[in-house]
Amino acid sequence: MITSVYLQLPKKSIGKFKGKLIKSLAFAFPSLLPVSVISAQPVQRPNVLFIMVDDLRPELGCYGVETVKTPNIDCLAEKSTLFQNAYCNIPVSGASRASLLTGMYPKFPERFKDYTVRASVDVPNAVPLSRVFTDNGYHTISNGKFFHHIDDFAETWSEPPFRTHPEGYDVYSNEYNRWEQWLNESSGNFINPRTKRGPYFEMAEVPDSAYDDGKLALKTIADLKRLKTLDMPFFLGVGFWKPHLPFNAPKKYWDLYDRDSIPLPTNRFRPKNLPVEVQNSGEIYAYARVREPEDTDYLRELRHGYYACVSYVDAQIGMVLDALKELDLDKNTIIVLLGDHGWNLGEHNFIGKHNLMKTSMQSPLLIYVPWLEGGKTLSMVEFVDIYPTLCELCDLPVPNNQLDGQSFISILENPKSKTKDHVFVQWQGGYSIVSERYNYAEWPEVEDKPVMIFDHKKDPQENKNRSKECRYKFLIRKLSRKVDNAIHQSSYKSYK
């Protein structure tokens, strides 16, 4: 009876109406509702466990990559909505997180500089997601690297943000191992003289809690036990550091892989006709023992280290999810898990992020909503969409004239539905429109206005820029107008 009522509503209205109708009738006429309907939507406001993983690309078991061992994330994926076309809005940690957590495009130098200095400085008038939850009765906690910097909107959380090393880790230091990232004594034999950082990888015979992500998992579990006792819902943000460089993880996670069996990319060459503006990231060269990606043994070693760190962080996520279930909190907790952007592992001889190739921009995104079934979706979503989606799921207000994203709650309710046909990504003067079929980018301020377009139907690995082919000229003009429309969103003008 109840189901037939709300299924007649417009799809975008079903989520809110369904929840409010069920709650009202559950209180007034509990005998009229079948048990399955009563349990479908929680009467209490849902909690949110938001897990961000640094540099995690969509190369996981649940994304069809059997080489990578991620049993805990895969288990979460089985009951979640898995987004196969989720994209960051800028391929670098600081600006991506600032954009995601304020719901605003990082379009211009005035907002979210490519290597964000401080989110709260770049957009002081923004209302971060943490503020919305805190001001509406949630107890909010930030653990680990959630915002890029620990003092980004720190006052908007119920408790001071937590990190094992509050001042670390992403700035150069004149002191080797200041933040205890390397645990093997032998790692000190390899130090980059320019940055004082150690080798780009390490395998140590240590327990999980010896490295920071293990400590973070234990802190988060302790917080869950404490939050269980509070008479209010919670928003718990957790930012795991790995698989970010350096690829340091307990040896048992390296032992999960046979290095000689790790596959290498088949496109270890620069794409044909690629604009010079698309370059490799220099991030890894801040570490020691680095070679060039053309070296096959080095690339296998590098991929081995990345996979070991992915498996290590998967184990920490598993501990947190197990605690959530043991505390009987999973039945009323929305779980968001994502990587903050993509990462190149040798494709086109690129290592790292920092360009407008698909491998730098595409990210894993899983969202578990206890009262929804989940499933895999091909629908396009971008990170600025997460802010309004969580607000709608939790029935919270959103700031007027700020958000560039739109809620995709309709996709969570029906994975076959769509809310948009493309996403918008920016990097160092370049602007990209990505759809299910195309990756288009332009650099309008460069003298010759270079353009690239990859046709994923013909070229899923992005090996050839087709911008000079006549058949794409009309499409290029159309996509260029979409870039212009995105740049001139009204919310940017409001906060310029």
Image (cartoon, rainbow, N blue to C red):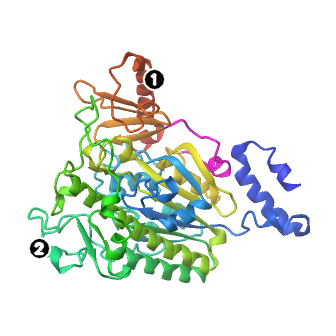
Q: Is residue 463 above or below residue 355?
A: above
Q: Which mark is residue 478?
A: 1
Q: Which residues are magenta?
A: 406-422
Image x and y of residue 150, in percent: 35, 68
Instruction: Please tell me whether residue 276 is drawn above or below residue 376 in the rendered image.
Output: above
Q: Considering the whole magenta stretch, tell me its main secondary structure.
A: loop
* Residue drawn at the location 32% of the way across and 51% of the way down: 264
Disc number placed over residue 189 in the picture, else none: 2
Q: In screen coordinates, is 288 left or right of 421?
A: left
SS for dot 2: helix
Q: Residues within 10 Å of mark 2 (few under 14, many from 20)?
A: few
**Residue 198's quadrant in the figure?**
bottom left
The extreme left residue here reads 193
Disc 1 residue crowd, few under 14, some 14–19, many 20+, Cα 10 Å? few
Q: Position of residue 209 (x, y in %)?
A: 37, 81
- Nearest to the eye among marks 2 and 1: give it: 2
Of residues 268 and 386, which is closer to you in this image?
A: 268
Residue lying farthest top? Answer: 470
Looking at the rendering, which quadrant does residue 255 occupy?
bottom left
